[in-house]
Image (cartoon, grey):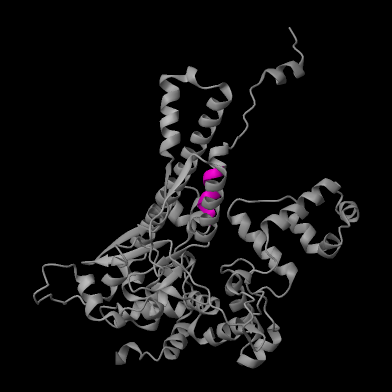
Amino acid sequence: MDMDLDAIQEQLPQQTMKVSPRLVAANHILQLSSMELQQAIAAELDENPALELIDVPTCPTCGSQLQGSICPVCIRRQKPENQLLDGPDANDEPYYSQSLRSSEEEFDPITQVAAEVSLPERLLTELRAVVQPELMHVAEYLVGNLDEKGYLSCTIEEAAYECGVEEYEVDLVLKLLQSLEPPGIGARNLRECLLIQLEYLETLGIHQPFAKEIISTHLTELGEHKFSKIAQDLRISSEVVSDVWEFIKRELNPHPAHEFYSTSGGQQDGRETRSSYVLPDVIITERDGEFDVEVVESKRFLLRVSPVYSQISADLERDGDRYSEDEKRHIQQYVARAKLFIANINQRRQTIHRITTCLVECQRDFLSKGVRYLKPLTRAAVAGKLGIHESTVSRATASKFVMLPNGEVIPFSNFFTASLSIKDVIEELIENEKAPLTDAEIAQRLAQRGIHVARRTVAKYRMQLKILPSSLR
């Protein structure tokens, strides 16, 4: 007995992937920067009467919760390890109270490096982790030639001439600069800036059909709103072009450095002079050789469902007849929305804490000894260790900052590097050698790490590092 093929196809179950609104909201909250999170919380507080913020005074330097007018985190960082208390008041007040009273001038948050980080300083700090030392002067030249928009104001040829290097070396450093945040930094024009940001969004799982093609080939026409011409050239609908236009206005920033500079009226040599003040999202502290991770938001933003709405919501369960359908809908909608928002904030904290704890485990030497001990680590590797998606790691670490045990504030991106400078690895091998390694043996050790270089190349790098051969070490 024959059966109509169309009928068979209609009966087959179709599997489609649906993303729940809750997951979309959670991912949105996760990828927000600290400033954006504050704005999102403020907006939600304005729109939802069932949500309430518990006001907690926080430290302007690190963002931790204050105890009275004192930040215990900042005080603890200044306390000498061998400090002993003595005197008549030693048992009456905590150390930080006595310390501040005895020498208030010594504690000045403005002098804390963590409190003030300019964009050029932050970029150079990140570049030192990935750029070979002999090319750092190129990195400094490029960063020094960023305009107030974040664009590179010199050409590759000019940078190569001024720095005395080859053009391909400048191009290599520029690509590393363009891989940093804010996305689009170091672009040479608007088109390159937008394309860099598109690639960044794609790492977060955000895609817009035909956006790359339109920006690459029809950016001028797009600015002139010639949607029909673009659609005709690319053989797509005008609606698709319009969607790309809206996406660019909504998601991309033509001035990536804008948030770091403000037209406050004070400029010097045509450049803005205002620094960007960065509060860490996470604080890593060290006690007795162990590292502790604290997500600052857990103390900076304390949210709860309004007690009034909680009470009314409980009354609905016991005596719902007292309220009209509109009142019930109003209460249930806003209470549920508040609980979901709080749950997403808590999930954000937990995710950031898990990822930071994993980073601490992987980069203990970096935290203890400095950037030379930074190990190759990718977001995919961290995702694999935690059993989560790589895009989750990207969202959780994007535009967020960490305070290290030494008080320095760095972006999360500093923890990630696909590969280290070959010189750094050679120096590490020699520093940790039990017996002097020959150049050939170093080449073999490098090959075991997936770095394939000739023995004579090892010898050249070793000489540049001013390290003696094995026979003289």
Q: Is residue 422 magenta?
A: no
Q: Is residue 389 visible?
A: yes
Q: Which quadrant of the rendered structure holds the C terminus?
A: bottom left
Q: Quadrant of residue 425?
A: bottom left
Question: Horizontal and vertical percent for residue 41?
Answer: 51, 51
355 and 277: which one is in front? 277
Question: Horizontal and vertical percent for residue 196?
Answer: 66, 65
* Residue drawn at point x = 67 percent, y = 51 percent: 207
171 and 398: which one is in front? 398
Q: Which quadrant of the rendered structure holds the N terminus?
A: top right
User: In this rendering, would 316 be left or right of 391?
Assistant: left
Against 325, is 443 above or below? below
42 and 433: which one is in front? 42
Against 227, is 110 above or below? below
User: In this rendering, would 458 be left or right of 244?
Assistant: left
Q: How many marks?
A: 0
Question: Horizontal and vertical percent for residue 273?
Answer: 58, 82
Q: Is residue 79 visible?
A: no
Which residues make up the magenta segment?
25-32
User: In this rendering, would 150 be left or right of 358?
Assistant: right
* Residue drawn at point x = 63 percent, y = 51 percent: 206
* Residue drawn at point x = 59 percent, y = 81 percent: 143
Q: Quadrant of residue 194?
A: bottom right
Residue reaching furthest to the front: 322
* Residue drawn at point x = 87 percent, y = 54 percent: 227
306 and 119: which one is in front? 306
Residue reaching furthest to the top: 1
Question: Horizontal and vertical percent for residue 439?
Answer: 39, 83
How would you classify the magenta stretch by its main secondary structure? helix
